[in-house]
Amino acid sequence: MSQRNTNDKVAVVTGGNKGFGLSLVRILCKSGFPGVVYLTARDEGRGRAALEQLKGEGLNPRYHQLDLAYGESIRGFAEHVKKEHGGLDVLIANGSIPFSPGMRYEQVEEAIRSQETAFCLICLRFFGLTSSNVCVTRTNNKGNAELCTTLLPLFRPDGRLLVVSSGFGQLVHLGPDLRKKFLATDSMGVEDLNNLLDDYLRDLKAGDAEQKGWPDWGNKVSKIGLVELARILDQQTRSEPQRYPGLLVNAVCPGWMMTDVSRPCLDKENKFGADQAKMPDEAAVDVVWLATLPGSSQPAGQLVQYRKVIPFEG
């Protein structure tokens, strides 16, 4: 029997089968969100196992398969939301391939394999470890960009769109010329951003990425790109207020967490420098606050951490 109800609010969390994504779904359900919460994941088995885990905790999210590496999967999910609910209220774009600094070849291969992304495995096996940057950029950046632009027309009034990034998404990690390019948000579209990220991959392949001002770790490039995506979407939607009334778009940094991805960066006291890592459920509280912020026009187009704006410029 169909569960169709176009009166319910709808929230979507991508990458929701483990770690921080699972915590986001859990905290969103516990927050009393007045409607349907979707847990999405690439792998059907892992996604449904996470769903059953949350149901065992007395929560009632729904599951839908979604693979950011494939446009067909993204479009199919958008069609499902439109058909079943008529619109969307909250999107937390959290889905990504994990990529920690210092990861060995076998660890990167396992991280990519766990995402069931065939394209990334092909890149890794045939082109070597450096090409994991191609996989990260394709899924984490271009995949999230396609997801957000595909779901954007479905947003109802006063919607909330969050792109999960990190403090590594600040421009301080780029050389001066590249900073200027990323600050030109007014004249940049999503395709322009994708082209700029392609420039990074070409420079990386040529062996002169650092000389051209790119950071030494591809994950920083990816996080900067995700913040810029939120800024571009904010500019786009604010320029069409009648089409997107009340929609707030932001990037969000949950801070350091005790997850499999973050642990290699933490010391024995679970700190990164002076920052104490949080448990994922604790970190999810601030992100869900921003995702459900009522009746506000700010923040918009910002990088937000712990309910405060972090300057994009660093």
Image (tube, rainbow, N blue to C red):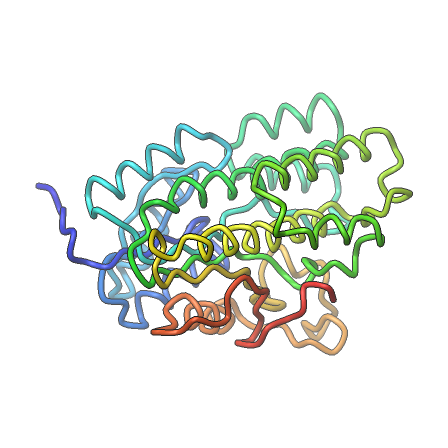
Q: 247 or 59, which is in the foreground?
A: 247
Residue at x 33% of width, y 52% of height: 155
Residue 85, image x, y percentages: 20, 48
Q: Is residue 180 left or right of residue 73?
A: right
Residue 67, image x, y percentages: 44, 36
Residue at x 57% of width, y 34% of height: 113
- Residue 223, above or below 210: below
Q: Is residue 113 left or right of residue 25?
A: right
- Residue 146, above or below 17: above
Residue at the outermost right position: 211
* Quadrant placement of the C terminus: bottom right
Residue at the outermost top position: 126
Numbered marks: total: 0
Residue 44, image x, y percentages: 36, 38
Residue at the outermost left position: 1
Residue 136, image x, y percentages: 63, 40
Residue at x 56% of width, y 66% of height: 254
Q: Is residue 129 left or right of residue 158?
A: right
- Residue 297, above or below 55: below
Residue at x 47% of width, y 68% of height: 287
* Quadrant placement of the N terminus: top left
